[in-house]
Amino acid sequence: MSSGNTPTLTLKEKKIISSSGRKIIFTAGRPPWYNHVGEVCSPFLIGITGGSASGKTTVATSIIQELGVPWVVLMSMDSFYRELTPNEKILAEENNYDFDHPNAFDFDLCYDVLRKLKSGKGVELPIYDFKTHSRSKETQKLYGANVIIFEGILSFYSKKIRDLMDMLIFVDTDSDIRLARRLKRDITERGRDIHGVIKQYNRFVKPAFDEFIFPAIKYAHMVVPRGAENVVAIDLIVKQVQRQMRSRGFNFREQLLNAHQNKTSPNSLFLLPETKQIKGLHTIIRNKETPRDDFVFYSNRLMRLAAEFCLSLLPYRTKVVVTNRGREFSGLKLTEKLCGVSIIRAGVTMESSLRAICKDIPIGKVLIQTDPVTEEPALHYLCLPKNIKDKNVILLDPTIATGAAALMAIRILLDHDVKEENIIFLSIIAAPAGIHSVAYAFSKVKIVTTAVDEYVNEKFHIIPGLGNFGDRFLGTE
């Protein structure tokens, strides 16, 4: 049985649970994990195996420290132990259950979690309680990584799991050292007596190593004798991973700017009819002489109209109600559950308009900002409504410039299993380049806006001549 003291580790990431039960993730700024057409760039998956107490976790931690990559996930195979039956729990308490045999693990669940992580999806990682020999009701939310390290005594056992891995490492440590480490760990950390540990080692651990673990050395791309003490081997591994990471990189924003020039307006664009009211509202909010209070009032009115138009694109069914006078009225009711997600800071300004129409609608938030060094969009904060995959989602952001933030927000929703056709991107003003970037990457996403303007600027959101419309939405005043 491997160590598994820390089943999962995500560097430079902080996670909390809000009072509403929603999982909130703060990050160091995750760069795009997809290309300009929205296709996910798979993370680099490293598998590490070796005997119990061989130093697999220490090797993995050393690799992480040397890599210096902000988004790394370390997973232990201990998370995927099976739920024990009542009889098996009795055997486990008596040190008579074989935790080192393949039958002790749920390989199907393990494969499913790794496959989803490698495809960019968010997953719920099980947490195994060694005291009760059962899975905790709590799970750990994982979403996204540049590098995934998966370690465990039988991490090479399943062929379909091996096939997911980009690099396989076998940690080869002397059996006496492994036994000494196991004795120290199980006695001090798990409260077991020395006789029980030695009995379990001779009956289960050593035979499993000889039959299942050591034969897997033939699959390894690299064997690391002496574990983390072998600094030369660690350095070689790190350099190989860094080469692979560089080969997967791309200049995201530059690709966006050049990808869809001179293309026609997409079918997924829904532009509010240019009525006298819409044109009048735009005249007011674009005028740099407009007082702030007037700007807020009329821009809120424009947002309200846009939100109402947005709801008209959703599916409805007939609903019969009884009026106060006892008469029946045949009307319409939304057939699908609905939620919103605002791209902060600017998207927050649209929340009140959406709530004015849908009073109790849950609204999540994502913070996407341009990295000052790479000039690429980066994800810093994530808080999504519960069960978002079962809902229609309205993304809120007043402006679409290059479409970089819009693409990232949509990719986040898709990674959390929201259907592409269930996403509506609601904006007030959009540039043709940004519309094309979104539409040609995600053709089923509906884009709703009140105006298309080629003068929207990628850096300041609006160019001189259109007033301080962008600055006010961004909250810089």
Image: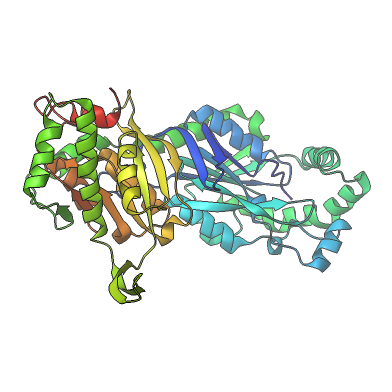
Nearest the eye: 66 or 474: 474
The number of callouts visible is 0
385 displayed left or right of 170 = left
380 displayed left or right of 126 = left
Q: Give how far across and how far down residue 282 sits, in percent.
A: 12, 38
Instruction: Please indicate, yes or no, whether residue 270 appears anywhere in the rendered image.
Output: yes
Q: Is residue 177 above or below residue 195?
A: above
Nearest the eye: 457 or 167: 457
Residue ranking furthest to the right: 195
Residue lying at 15% horizontally and 41% vertically, measured from the top left: 433
Residue lying at 81% horizontally and 60% vertically, measured from the top left: 97
Q: Give how far across and how far down residue 112 sits, in percent.
A: 52, 59
Nearest the eye: 411 or 104: 411
Residue lying at 72% horizontally and 60% vertically, measured from the top left: 101
- The quadrant holding residue 137 is bottom right
Instruction: Please indicate, yes or no, whether residue 164 appears anywhere in the rendered image.
Output: no
Q: Is residue 48 above or below residue 113?
A: above
Q: Give how far across and how far down residue 93 sits, in percent.
A: 86, 57
236 displayed left or right of 292 = right
Q: Give how far across and how far down residue 184 sits, in percent.
A: 83, 37
Q: Quadrant of the C terminus?
A: top left
- The quadrant holding residue 349 is top left
Residue lying at 22% horizontally and 26% vertically, measured from the top left: 292
- The quadrant holding residue 353 is top left
362 displayed left or right of 136 = left
